[in-house]
Amino acid sequence: MNEKQHIEILKKVDSALDEIRPFLQKDGGDVELIKVSKEKAYVSFLGNCKSCSMNTSTFEHGVMQTILKAVPEIKKVEIMQDPVRLKS
């Protein structure tokens, strides 16, 4: 994938996350996109979502399904527990 396609996919994934974000924020949590590599999106839970006992279900039935449905270029979504953030 070229840079332009990569940027478009990032925007699509972010837009998909915006659909589910209000439900997570209502309970003091959130989700962020860490990176997209090839056909995979990597996300991380924030706030209360990190330690919530329902985060596996939220990931599988909320976050992952929302991304896969909205962004057909993404074939797999993985959650990163403690992602390393690179400085810009």
Image (cartoon, grey):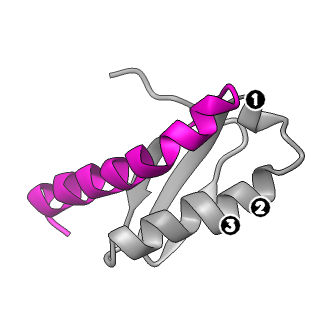
Give me the residue at 70% from left, 31% from top.
27
Q: Could you give the CA–CA distance between mark 1 and mark 3, rounded to whole angstroms? A: 17 Å
Q: Position of residue 69 (x, y in %)?
A: 41, 75
Q: Is residue 77 visible?
A: no
Q: Could you give the CA–CA distance between mark 1 and mark 2, rounded to whole angstroms? A: 14 Å
**Residue furthest to the top:** 87
Label 1: element kind: helix
- Does the CB distance between marks 3 and 2 fall below 8 Å? yes
Q: Quadrant of residue 29?
A: top right
Q: Position of residue 75 (x, y in %)?
A: 45, 78
Please tell me which of labels 1 and 2 falls first in the chain. Answer: 1
Q: Amino acid at mark 1?
A: Asn
**Which quadrant: the N terminus?**
bottom left
Residue beneath disc 3:
60
Queried whether the magenta region covers residue 23, the answer comes back as yes
Please tell me which of labels 1 and 3 falls first in the chain. Answer: 1
Residue toward you, 61 or 39:
61
Q: Which mark is residue 56?
A: none
Q: Main secondary structure of the magenta part?
A: helix
Residue beneath disc 2:
57
Crowding at label 2, few (<14), some or many (≥20) Cα neighbours within 10 Å?
few
Residue beneath disc 1:
48
Q: Amino acid at mark 2?
A: Ser
Q: Is residue 7 visible?
A: yes
Residue toward you, 47 or 44:
47
Q: Is residue 64 left or right of residue 45?
A: left
Q: Amino acid at mark 3?
A: Glu
Residue range corresponding to the magenta coloring: 1-30
Q: Is residue 26 above or below residue 68?
A: above
Q: Position of residue 7 (x, y in %)?
A: 19, 51
Crowding at label 1, few (<14), some or many (≥20) Cα neighbours within 10 Å?
some
Q: Could you give the CA–CA distance between mark 3 and mark 2, rounded to whole angstroms? A: 5 Å
